[in-house]
Image: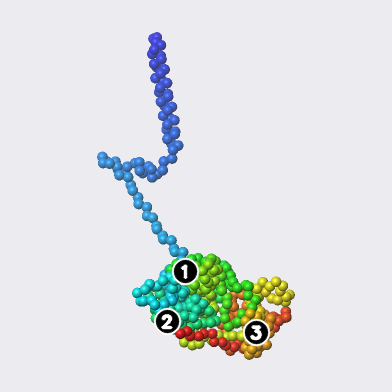
Amino acid sequence: MTISGEFRQALFTLVASIIAGALAGSIAGWMFVQAPVLPNEILIAVPSQTTGTAPMPDIKVIPVDRTPLEPIVPPAFAERRTSSIATVYAVHPSKNASDLLLREDVLTLAVAITSDGWFVAPQDAIEDRRIEDLLFWHDGRVATATKAVADDRGGVIFFKTDLDSLTSPAFARYQDVSRGLAAWLERRSGSFEAVSVTALNDDADNLQGRTSRRVFRRLLLTGLSRDRDTGAPVWGMNGTLLGIVDSGPDEPLRVLPASAWSPSLSYVLLGEKVMHADLGVRAADLVYLRLLRPEEHMPKRGAWLLRDKAASLPAIDRGSAAAVAGLKEYDVIQRIDRDILDGTADLAEILAQYKPGSDVTLAVIRNGEVIDIPVTLGSVVVSRELK
């Protein structure tokens, strides 16, 4: 049988179409297999039931755990039942009971130190005002001072008010404070600012002998003081009171350490005169002095007994415990019993740990030689009641 040319051409076209279709299907199948298909996508694409109704995909609710972030302020502050701060105003006789307390009338902040109404504030901020001219504002309550005791050694005034149910703090010792220590400055009630201790004593320019009857040391913190920062508390991370601000606006942030005045509080609460042990000397802390030409035997630390030339006062008071023991001008006290004078505390702060009349041994450098001098500590009254 003879196959015509037209039939041969049609047969060839049909075979070529079949081969091309098979090849195209193979390529498409290979490409589809290469694309990843996730299991959950399959679940969504395939209905859960094969009925005549519309398919419903399976829905799984994933629970989300919500854990609130802890506050940056430690619970020791955030969970206090009442504020530790009162604002002290100067009350003018011309004011009426309905008048507002103005910002310019603020003298200082005061910090609650007992639950039954005792507060502490820097002595310099109150000046010579009568206690009847002072008004305390605390958590919406107004109170007056019923008693005020000045601690000339610590540089503070203790006020008794009729406020109650206050938060009373623990006090940091001078051994607890070091350079670089992180702390919280409470400029206003409940408003905390992170600071750190940069120096344990910022007074490095004094070459006069300072009396052992008063604490002159001030902690230096990062930042500057602002308006009405005086008296603001500085807290350690564990909630202890490190001290209160004792600097004016735009000045370096200086803090009167709690260790300077907390030993006097027990006397005040008992209604007694504040009495502390005393040597009766004047000294400069060698840790913070930068002498131009120090002598070869001059140590790097200790209380250097010097006279106060500006006030014409001797290095050693006549008849004092130091005079009786035989101490001399230019002696350097390096240790009182086991307490080393290394710049972490004033001489007055260390003496406050001892009772008046205690027998102690001083390690003294005199002309390059170390000698031990036994001393019976004297006593001094450092308080006075304000009217």
**Gap between marks 2 and 1, in whole Å?**
26 Å
Marks 2 and 1 close (CB-CB < 8 Å): no
Name the mark on residue 314. 3
Q: Position of residue 60 (x, y in %)?
A: 35, 50
Location of mark 1 (residue): 187
**Image quadrant of residue 101?**
bottom left
Q: Position of residue 180 (x, y in %)?
A: 57, 67
Judged left or right of residue 282, residue 172 is left
Name the mark on residue 221. none
Residue 116 visible in the displayed image: no
User: How many residues crowd around disc 1 within 10 Å: few (fewer than 14), some, or many (20 or more)?
Assistant: many
Q: Amino acid type of disc 1?
A: Arg
Q: Position of residue 189 (x, y in %)?
A: 43, 70
Residue for point 43% across, 36% down: 33
Front residue of 32/297: it is 297
Residue for point 55% across, 81% down: 153
Residue for point 48% across, 78% down: 126
Name the mark on residue 132. 2
Dot 3: element: loop
Front residue of 313/328: it is 313
